[in-house]
Amino acid sequence: MALDGPQDESDDSPATARSREEMDAEDAAIDAGEQDEPEEETGLRRPTTRAAVQVTVGSLLAIAGGELLSAQRWYWAVLACWIVFLNTASTGEILVKGYRRVLGTLFGVVAGIVLAGLVGNHTWLAFGLVLLLIFAMFYTAPLSYTLMSFFVTAMLGLLYTLLHTYSMSVLLLRVEETALGAACGVVAAALVLPVRTDRRTDELLGTVLERLKDVTEGAVDQLSGGPAADLLDRARDLDQALGDLRAATQPLTHPVTPLRARRDTARYVVALLETCAYHARSLAATAELLPTHPSIAADPRLRGAVRRTVRNIEAIAAHVADRQAGTEVETGPSIASLLKPDAAGAPRYGRITGRVLRHLERLDEAVAGLAKPLGVSVATPRR
C-alpha cells in the first residue's frame, strides 16, 4: 500500500480490506475536492492584495494632506481613510461610507459644541453623558454608520471637556481631517485598481441565484419524497448572500444618486429576490416538518412541476455571468395545472400540495419577473 502500486489482495484479512477501502474512499474524496476547488485569483487581481495597495496609496495621501492641516492631528485623516475601506469591496461602497462618515462627524461636532456648552464645569454630568454616548455608539453601529460617527464625535467633544482641552477649533479640525481622509480613500479606490459597483453586484447576484436554486431544489426534492437534506444551512447561506447583495447595492439605491432609473431597477430586483427567498425559506420550513408532522405527506408530482422554475433560475444566472449567453426564461401554465392526477386516479391536490402550492406559484412568478429588469429574453409559451 505504501508503494501505491498493484496489490495482491487475496490474502487480506477483513480488517485490512476494510482499511484499504477507507483509504481508497478518502483518496477519492480528496481528489474530488481538489477538482471542484475554484481557481483563486493571484497577484493584483486578488481582492486582499488590491485592497492593501489602495489603502497604502490612500494613507500616503492622507498623511501628506493631514500634515498640512495639523502637525498634531494628522492621524485623524489616516484613521478616516482606513475606516472607509473596512467591510467594503467596490468604489461605490467606499464612496457611500466616506459620505456617511463625514456627515455623521459634521453633525457630531455640532452636538459636541452644544453639549459642551450645556455641561459647563459639571464634571460628573459630562462623565455620565460620555458613558451614554459610548453606549449609543455601539448600539447604533450595526444599524447606521452615520449615527455611530455622530455619537463618536459628540462623545469626543464631551471627553475634551472632561480633560479641560475642549476647543471649538479642535472639533472643526476633526471635520476637516475626516473629510480629507475620506476623500483620499475614495480617490485611491477610484484610481488605483478600481472595482466597479456593477461588477461587484453581478458577482453577488450570481451567488444569490445559486443559493436560491440550492434551497428550492433541496426543499422540493424532500417534499417529493427524497432523502432529508440540511435545508437550514442552505437557507442561512441564501440569507447571507442576499444581505451581501443588499449592502453592495447601497451606492445604487442611495437617495442622492443621480441615476434614478438605475436606482429603481436595483430596488426592484432586490425586492423580487427577497420575495423569492421568502417563499424558498417557506418551502424549506415545510419540508423540515415532513418526518414529524402527521398531517403532512410527500407528493412526488412536485419534482416535475418545479423544473421550469429551476431552469429559469439557471438561465438568469447564466445571463448575469455572461450577457451574451443568449438564455431565455420560460413561461407557461401555472404550477397547479402541472400537478396532474396519477395513474391510480388520486386527487390533483394532496395534503402537502395544498400547503406548498401557493409558495411554488409565487416563487415561479417572482423568478420570471426578474427577466425584464435584468434584460433576459422571455420565451413565448408553447400551445
Image: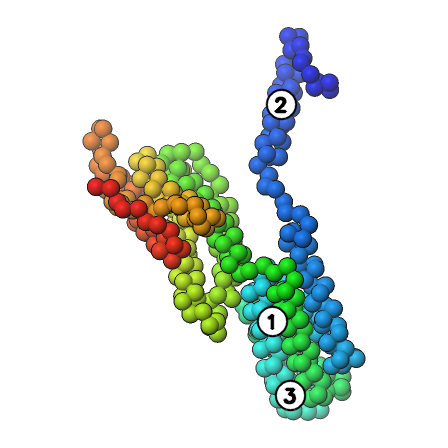
Circle 1 sits in a helix, a strand or a loop, which is it? helix
Q: How many marks?
A: 3
Asked if residue 260 shows in the view, the reply is yes
Q: Residues within 10 Å of mark 3 (few under 14, many from 20)?
A: some
First-in-chain label (3 vs 2):
2
Say which amino acid is labelled 3.
Ile
Place of residue 305 in the rendered image (x, y in percent of width and height, measured from the top left): 31, 39
Of the numbered discs in the image, which one, if any, rests on residue 113? 3
**What residue sits 71% from the left and 88% below the top?**
169
The kind of residue on which mark 2 rests is Asp
Which residue is tagged 1? 98
What is the x, y in percent for residue 59?
Answer: 72, 68
Q: Nearer the viewer, residue 256 or 30?
A: 256
> Which circle's residue, 3 or 1, is located before the other in the chain?
1
Which residue matches tag 2?
24
Q: Classify mark 2: helix, strand or loop.
A: helix
- For mark 3, give the secondary structure: helix
- Residue drawn at the location 51% of the way across and 59% of the way down: 198
